[in-house]
Image (spheres, rainbow, N blue to C red):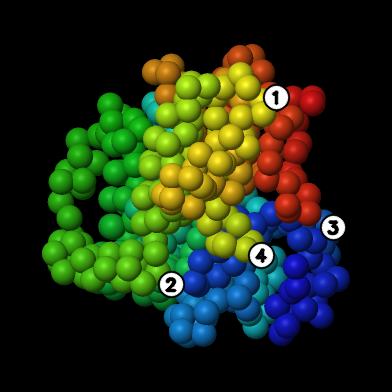
Amino acid sequence: MSLPKDDAATLSARWTEGVLLKRDVFSTVERGRFRGDSGEVDAVLRRLDEVPWWSFVLARHLFAREKHALALAKGLNVGPELLWAGRRALVRGFVDGVALHLAKPHGDLAYFRSAKAALRRLRRAGICHNDLAKEQNWLVGRDGRAYVTDFQLAACFNRRGRLYRILAYEDLRHLLKHKRSYAPEALTPRERKILAKKSFAASLWLATGKKVYRAITRGLFNFTDREGGGRRLVNDAPVLAELIRKNPAVRDTAIVAFADRRSGVGLYAFVEADQATLEGELRSELSAAKGPKPPEHIQVVHALPRDTSGKPRTEILQLVAMNQLDLIEPMMKNDQDRAFLKDILEQRKNLRDRFNFEADLPAS
């Protein structure tokens, strides 16, 4: 894949392309390797050269905000480090961790203590993140600590005025909402009061601005879900899953989204069945149904990984679809999970990216 023209001279010598993480109207985000003064490290590249012309001005503004916030947060150890920045691309360090909605840290009090400490460090540096309602912007590190990422909406302050205090308060409220979801019994009386009391700005936003925001992001920008799968995951995947389950050879299916270099968002269907050659039959049935576009990948597996309630563990399947394989091992609960994973990895379909991150995985 070609590099941003304005920054190609530097990046061609220092950046090794890896896997696509995200692609939208504001940027393309890839994971790869970056060669710095102290050696080569895992890193994330955000680039603006592929955004549409009509969103470029806003994309450049968000890019500048993130660059400034990352520079200010250097050394705080709360998120990625800014490794390099050019005109239309920046490279930040890779945080070895999994997004909150995938890791699901139920009852993990140490994680939420760490998250609160991270917010305190950001606050002391005058940084308000402004996008912490999204679970994908909170990471559960391999070390168990909390990290935040995606600083495109961050605001940086030299003085702690009224606006700063309002935004910092809302950052804290969003953290406490996540704590309420995963560790509600650990909420203190003071934290419950904070959750019950929105700032005036937040109340005004919910009553007015959020409706406009949703109309724009869901209509114009096609953002509809927290995993970044857009309308295909929200609208198409349930229909496709129902069609797949109609085949008598299918026991169950789970469909997840992944970033696709050609279409932006792709769908990956994992189908639980015994017939390994079922893929072609399913594709024919989906095409004949004249419904939504079939998934880019259909993989037949003997068994889907499941949680204690019997639901498919889509957080694991999501990482397989995204080729983020090295992040899966910490999420394995037992030997049965590892056996399921080995079966899935041996037959996985999404191999278009130049290389995968496959440390410490079950041998194939």
Report how far apart the C-alphas of labels 4 and 3 lie in the structure: 17 Å
Q: Amino acid at mark 3?
A: Gly
Which part of the image, by quadrant, shows the N terminus?
Answer: bottom right
Disc 1 target residue = 342
At horizontal 51% and vertical 24% (from top left) the residue drawn is 250
Nearer the N terminus, badge 1 or badge 4?
4
Disc 3 target residue = 39
At horizontal 28% and vertical 64% (from top left) the residue drawn is 214
Nearer the N terminus, badge 1 or badge 3?
3
Disc 2 target residue = 156
The answer to whether the residues at label 4 and label 2 have Cβ atoms under 8 Å apart is no
Q: Secondary structure under badge 2?
A: strand
Q: Amino acid at mark 4?
A: Leu
Q: Secondary structure under badge 4?
A: strand
Residue 142: x %, y % from top left: 61, 36
Nearer the N terminus, badge 3 or badge 2?
3
**In front: label 1 or label 2:** 1
Residue 125: x %, y % from top left: 47, 64
